[in-house]
Image (cartoon, helix red, strand yellow):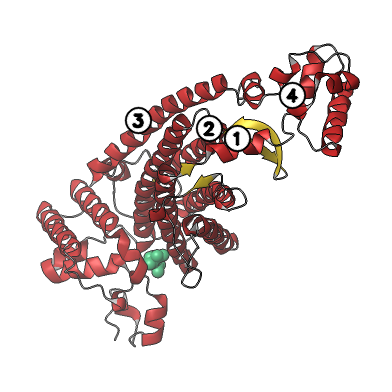
């Protein structure tokens, strides 16, 4: 005889090793809140539809609330024998209130129950991720404003290319993060569909009211196909995909941060409180946080691959393979939230070496495009101007000087179109100021970006606050 909640048709109890192998309680216990909220909504619905009595409903709701308190007080003993969070709670409830507890699972399967819990969990955590995105975005805007006049070389091929504002570089990451925010909004919408009532796979013979459950738990819509409801893991794949893209963004920022902290670049210095030292080399100050974020990106991308591969060959409807959806997404949630939070700190604590950045612009040829553009504005076709500027660079390299060190006679030698105003035209500040096309690096355009970013942040906050308020009603 098996003592499991499903033990009726079994003549033996489960092998201990198999028991441990198939249990998910060690990781799915973090959905206890969702499981209890879902069960309360289900019990309310069963009573409303006359499937259980009002007395049973009251006993269930009271019993579940007590279990919630026990779990939160750390007084709940989770058992591997009871497999997962659903049966741990149901068994404890039944021990406490008897037959009423045994009625809770009427018209419900663990297949739609686990789907419900996971939807609610992902929905809640998606808003938490959005909050962390906003925080990092705010840190970027603060830094962009603080260093609004710092010029640095912009790079292509990691070779100095054209002078840009450091703020422009920072605001590029702001833009990436705003797409991430929007992607998580999409994830939220797909997690906001209510699966309960699908039963094991085919619906139920009881006259349930799925609308009422959805209302109580604040779901936007209801799955309209029971097979889909219990098999769908799109919202998990979408979360992992949005999380992977976000981590790739943070990883690129990490790569730059690591480079900028090197002695070779020395563009920035991270706060001592945000770095670590070496156990052997006394002089070291390592940008571990950035390295770890870059490293953890691989992990999150791995979770996405694992989920895609897990679902790929699955027939409908529920298969135990789907239990594998949880550890990856839980880890991705923790990793993404933590990485965003530490990055906001890192940015807020960073010191910028404006003199080093500016030297990297003045002692360089990154104003060569501006020299060409100068000639174009005097009437020379761009291809010819490009060639003249190229010759000027070549001449300077041979004579160990920079473009701004050239005499007027040397300029005139290359083209009669050069006049005194060329000196002004190739100053880094002019190069930056003149790139005033929409979205460009000019002081004015970056100011506009920052203004727009602040407005967008307000809209993002309003959006995530509104969803967080909806969540609060459920809790
Ligand atoms: N722990 C299971 C999971 O996470 C719950 C659903 C189990 N359903 C079943 N038919 N065995 O997927």
Whether residue 394 sits left or right of residue 195 in the image: it is: right
Distance from disc 2 to disc 3, alpha carbons, whole Å, reads 25 Å
Q: Which of pointers 4 and 2 indicates the residue nearer the eye? A: 4
Q: Which quadrant does ligand 1 occupy?
A: bottom left
Q: Earlier in the sequence, mark 1 or mark 3?
A: 1
Judging from the image, what secondary structure is the residue with disc 4 in? helix
Please name the residue shown 57% across and 48% down the image: 266
Marks 4 and 3, how far apart at CA: 43 Å
| Sequence-wise first label, 4 or 1 | 1
Q: Which mark is residue 167?
A: 2
The answer to which of marks 2 and 3 sits earlier in the sequence is: 2
Q: Is residue 182 above or below residue 350?
A: above
Residue 180 higher or lower than 316, as above or below:
above
- Count of marks overlaid on the render: 4
Find disc 1 in the rendering and name its residue: 358
In-front residue for pair 113/69: 69
Contact between labelled residues 3 and 2, with CB atoms less than 8 Å apart: no
Residue 54 horizontal/vertical position (percent): 11, 51
* Label 1: which secondary element: helix
| Residue carrying label 4 | 370
Residue in front for this viewpoint, 183 or 309: 183
Q: Nearer the viewer, residue 301 or 376?
A: 376
User: Residue at label 3?
Assistant: 462
Question: In the figure, residue 364 lies in which quadrant?
Answer: top right
Q: Quadrant of residue 403?
A: top right
- Give me the C-alpha separation between circle 1 and circle 3: 39 Å
**Closer to the eye: label 1 or 2:** 1
**224 and 470: which one is in front?**
470
Relative to residue 110, is residue 44 drawn left or right?
Answer: left
The image shows residue 381, relative to residue 396, as above or below, that is above
User: Is label 4 in contact with label 2 (beta carbons under 8 Å)?
Assistant: no
Badge 1: few (under 14), some or many (20 or more) residues near its Cα, within 10 Å?
A: some
């Amino acid at each position: 005889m098996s003592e499991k909640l499903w033990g009726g048709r079994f003549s033996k109890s489960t092998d201990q090793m198999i028991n441990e192998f198939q249990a998910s309680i060690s990781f799915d216990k973090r959905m206890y809140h969702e499981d209890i909220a879902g069960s309360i909504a289900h019990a309310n619905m069963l009573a409303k539809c006359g499937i259980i009595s009002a007395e049973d409903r009251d006993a269930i709701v009271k019993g579940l609330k007590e279990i919630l308190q026990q779990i939160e007080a750390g007084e709940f003993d989770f058992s591997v024998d009871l497999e997962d969070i659903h049966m741990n709670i149901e068994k404890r409830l039944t021990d406490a209130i008897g037959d009423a507890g045994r009625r809770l699972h009427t018209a419900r399967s663990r297949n739609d129950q686990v789907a419900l819990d996971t939807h609610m969990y992902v929905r809640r955590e998606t808003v938490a991720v959005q909050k962390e995105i906003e925080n990092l975005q705010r840190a970027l805007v603060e830094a962009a404003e603080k260093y609004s006049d710092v010029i640095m070389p912009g790079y292509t091929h990691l070779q100095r290319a054209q002078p840009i504002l450091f703020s422009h570089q920072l605001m590029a990451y702001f833009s990436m993060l705003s797409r991430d925010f929007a992607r998580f909004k999409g994830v939220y919408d797909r997690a906001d569909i209510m699966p309960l009532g699908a039963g094991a796979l085919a619906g139920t013979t009881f006259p349930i009211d799925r609308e009422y459950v959805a209302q109580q738990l604040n779901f936007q819509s209801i799955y309209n196909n029971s097979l889909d409801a219990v098999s769908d893991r799109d919202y998990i794949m979408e979360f992992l995909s949005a999380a992977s893209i976000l981590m790739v963004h943070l990883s690129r920022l990490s790569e730059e941060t690591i480079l900028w902290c090197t002695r070779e670049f020395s563009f920035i210095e991270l706060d001592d409180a945000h770095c670590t030292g070496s156990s052997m080399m006394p002089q070291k100050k390592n940008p571990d946080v950035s390295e770890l974020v870059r490293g953890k990106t691989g992990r999150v991308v791995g979770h996405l691959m694992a989920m895609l591969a897990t679902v790929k060959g699955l027939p409908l409807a529920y298969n135990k393979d789907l239990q594998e959806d949880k550890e990856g997404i839980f880890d991705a949630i923790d990793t993404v939230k933590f990485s965003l939070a530490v990055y906001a700190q890192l940015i807020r604590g960073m010191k910028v070496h404006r003199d080093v950045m500016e030297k990297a612009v003045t002692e360089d040829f990154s104003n060569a495009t501006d020299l060409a553009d100068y000639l174009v504005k005097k009437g020379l076709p761009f291809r010819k101007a490009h060639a003249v500027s190229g010759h000027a660079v070549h001449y300077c390299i041979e004579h160990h000087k920079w473009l701004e060190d050239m005499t007027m006679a040397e300029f005139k030698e290359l083209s009669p179109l050069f006049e005194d105003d060329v000196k002004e035209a190739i100053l880094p500040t002019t190069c930056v100021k003149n790139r005033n096309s929409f979205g460009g690096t000019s002081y004015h355009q970056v100011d506009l970006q920052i203004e727009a970013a602040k407005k967008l942040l307000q809209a993002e906050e309003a959006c995530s606050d509104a969803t967080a308020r909806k969540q609060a009603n459920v809790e």
